[in-house]
Amino acid sequence: MSVVKTKIGRRSFIKNTSLAGGGLVLGFSFLNSCKPDQASNMVADELPKEWFEINAYLKIGENGKVTIMSPNPEGGQNVKTSMPMIVADELDVDWEHVIVEQASLDTDSFNFQFLGGSQAIRRGWEGLRMAGASARHMLMAAAAEKWQVPASEITTETGILKHGSSDRSMGYGEIASAAAKIPVPEEVELKEINDFKIIGTSKKNVDGLNIVTGKPLFSIDTYEEGMLTAMIVHPPAFGLKFKSVDDAAIKSMPGIRDVFPIKVLEDDYERQHFDTCTFLEVVVIVGDTTWQIMNAKKAIKIEWEPFETYTEERQPYSGPKQILTIPAGLENSEEHKAMMAAMTSKKAKEVRKDGNPERAFRNATKIVERIYTAPFLAHNCMEPMNFFANVTADKAELKGPLQKPELTEHAISERLGMPIENIDIQMTRLGGGYGRRSYAHWLIEAAIISQKVKAPIKLVYSREDDMTGGIYRAAYQVKYRAALDADHNITAFHVNAGGIPESPLYADRFPAGAVANYLAESWEINSNITIGSFRAPRSNFMASAEQSFLDEVAEATGKDPIDFRLELLEQAKNNPVGERNDYDAERYAGVLKLVKEKSNWDENFEGLSRGVSAYFCHNSYAAQVLDMKWENDKPVIKKVTCAIDCGIVINPDAAINLCEGGIVDGIGNALYGEQTFKEGVPQKSNFDSYRMIRMTEAPKEIDIHFVKSDIDPTGLGEPSFPPTFAAVANAMYKATGERYYHQPFLNNPSNNS
Amino acid sequence: MIMETFTLKINGTTKSIEVDPTTPMLWVLRDHFNMVGTKFGCGIAQCGACTVHLGDNAVRSCQLPISAVGDQDITTIEGLSENGDHPVQKAWLEIDVPQCGYCQAGQIMTASALLKKNPNPSDEEIEGAMNGNICRCGTYTRIKKAVKMAANSELS
């Protein structure tokens, strides 16, 4: 039995004294109009008359129903189901008796209310278990008091407290009122992994019925009394800024209430990591209906002007303060490519060096050298960027989809000059995030607009506003070199990686640690095109390039691509080079072995082109075999087999769904994803020009396997995504005899040069 | 701008509204009737999030001006079934299709229109019908499974 101190998020477990008196809690403070929860689908006699709050994570009704708060934002990764499952398992209740509610931002009660970095379950795991376990402990203590027996003699069984020797039992609901008054234990016992009843079983999405019946789950569905709608107009090109607006033509249009420019961030504001804001000044149109404002947007006359080069100070997520240079000018994708190509012959920053790579390359029998590139990508969340704001003199009520509410709270507090305690941020279900909604400048815009028009407003971006508004996945390039000796051993490995405007390099990732002589270098090119996290940031490119390159090196050595990787991992396991390698070679090899078995890799499949790829990121390991046929000059993906090691899996079917999504996303971006620029103007502004993967292009079958594990859960939202790109490229090579070095792989003239 | 009065039959209920006749049905539903199950995705009929039924046909409501509706019945996700128990909705729940869920009302409306016309579609017919609906989370393999499950339940 593992005993843990309840110190993580301990404030969650210390009850509000005003509640402790009667133990009665009259619900949580929510904006209810946009939040149908499971309770709304319950008939009245199933709901309890009273709720007793045991800690911030859960309350128990007198009839035994349990409400569990899901602390983190839900964006499709299904944490709103899987996080409460963890609490329910430790509490030992029937999942059918659980009602899930989305918590609001409450940094006193909850820890790490983030959506990002595949960290929700990994970082929530211990606190969620303690929330359930400490509540169970309090119920047992209350029962012991009532029955006048030692608490150690009390057991629980799915919502029932039992005292075996006196043959007494009662439901949690019967004692919940007394349990709410029991002191929070200093330490609690957690279940053994083998005793989990809910964790590891598939539970359906708690919002499923609301989704398939079109209930207003999303912030864009908010329509409140007296609410106005607002849209913005941002500069048409990167490198331009606002100069002046002529609103004469639109002020008299029906339904238009107001037109004005706003400054999103003040000049002296010290930015934090997620405070990226592409256009510091935008023009706002406020009106009655969306269609009226969309028409006004077409008619408005705005002058823009080039800006001068400037610098921006920023406190990154970790590490020292950065000073970024934002260069003036209207940038072009063709120039970007030429600038990146020129970097391969310039001196870059050395990030890691093992052994003597220069000598090893001099002495090589054969050198394989290849260059890989990838373009900017737009996130293209299906729910357009939007936020609801109702800002009054002393209060800001904000509601919408965002990934890092705690960090945004700081920015909005500074911008409004309002203390954080007067700001209430409600998290609605995200209609997709993928990193884009970590950069919540639209929340600030919405708040400023509401403050100015003195009314509740909903800010809505058009698809074009979003797709041409920056915060893209960066453009990248990497050059790999491998030195081989006469026996086909890799004697040296060289990675030179850079991008616009960030480098994708992970210097301590495989094959670092597996090769005696290793050199990793990094470079950056400044740009005024803004970037942001995009599902598995940097890994999504590095995996693509590295795993394509290793496929080619394996071929040069005449080895099977899986065996080749396993040999390198064996070296990294037995004789690791360097001390900073960030992966576990055994777990890495484990997913390759599992995918080899599950895909029947050693069998010969007539007419099928197979590509393999594996990668480690976000604390998890993923390997994939992709089966392709080339039909009518196009790839048809028959099947993707995927093996994942993410530790304990909470909700297997939902985990499979998430991995399937990562693979489809990877195929789509590998084949089609691209944003390009001419004179600073984004060339793709909607789904007619920005090519998204559609059903005909998705794999006909996806087969996901998890490595059985007792290790605490690690990330899952991202790790299935990065390896897919190279699995696609390597299968395309088998199908066509051509290597694909430049993304997107289809219809890209760079691949023919 | 001349406002006109329109009388519409939406989910079996007659509703009247005075509005600019160029207003797309999407915004009539969302902004005027507060029926928000029909989603705004792209505004140019490329993503399918706004799909509704006009008569028996799946149409993109963001490109359907209210003036073009006439006396045809409009069905939205809110009117597809009384309690979320249309065979397509049931199949969606059984397969647990959604991730973020934003596109799914549009997917369900396209799928239910397909099955009404073609109760037993082949894989290729399903792909063809569903190809106009983007799912950014990538639930396509589950959508296809759910359409097939719904087709079989309608036949039985």
Image (spheres, rainbow, N blue to C red):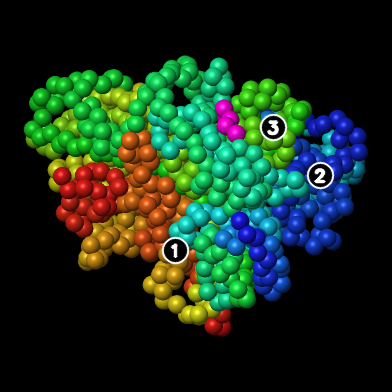
Q: From the image, tell me which residue sits under label 2.
A: A27
- The picture quadrant where one finds residue A258 is top right
Q: Quadrant of the C terminus of chain B?
A: bottom right
Q: Is residue B62 visible?
A: yes
Q: From the image, tell me which residue sits under label 1.
A: B132
- Element under label 2? loop
On screen, residue B50 versus residue A49, left or right, reads left
Q: Amino acid at mark 2?
A: Gly
- Element under label 3? helix
Q: Residue drawn at (32%, 60%), measured in percent from left and top?
A: A637
Q: From the image, tell me which residue sits under label 3.
A: A451
If you read the primary sequence from the N terminus, does the residue marked by circle 3 or circle 2 appear first?
2
Residue depth check, mark 1 versus mark 3: number of the one nearer the observer: 3
Q: Chain of mark 3?
A: A
Residue A698 position within the rendered picture, expressed as x and y whole percent measured from the top left: 38, 60
Magenta extent: A260-264
Residue A657 position within the rendered picture, expressed as x and y whole percent measured from the top left: 50, 55
Q: Quadrant of the N terminus of chain B?
A: bottom right
Q: Is residue A319 visible?
A: no
Magenta span: chief secondary structure: strand
Q: CA distance from mark 3 to mark 2?
A: 29 Å
Look at the picture and state if A334 lies above or below A419.
Answer: below
- Element under label 1? loop
Same chain for the residues at labels 3 and 2, yes or no? yes
Residue A416 among those drawn in magenta:
no
- The picture quadrant where one finds residue A45 is bottom right
Q: Chain of mark 2?
A: A
Residue A228 position within the rendered picture, expressed as x and y whole percent measured from the top left: 68, 44
Q: Amino acid at mark 3?
A: Gln
On screen, residue A35 versus residue A524, left or right, reads right
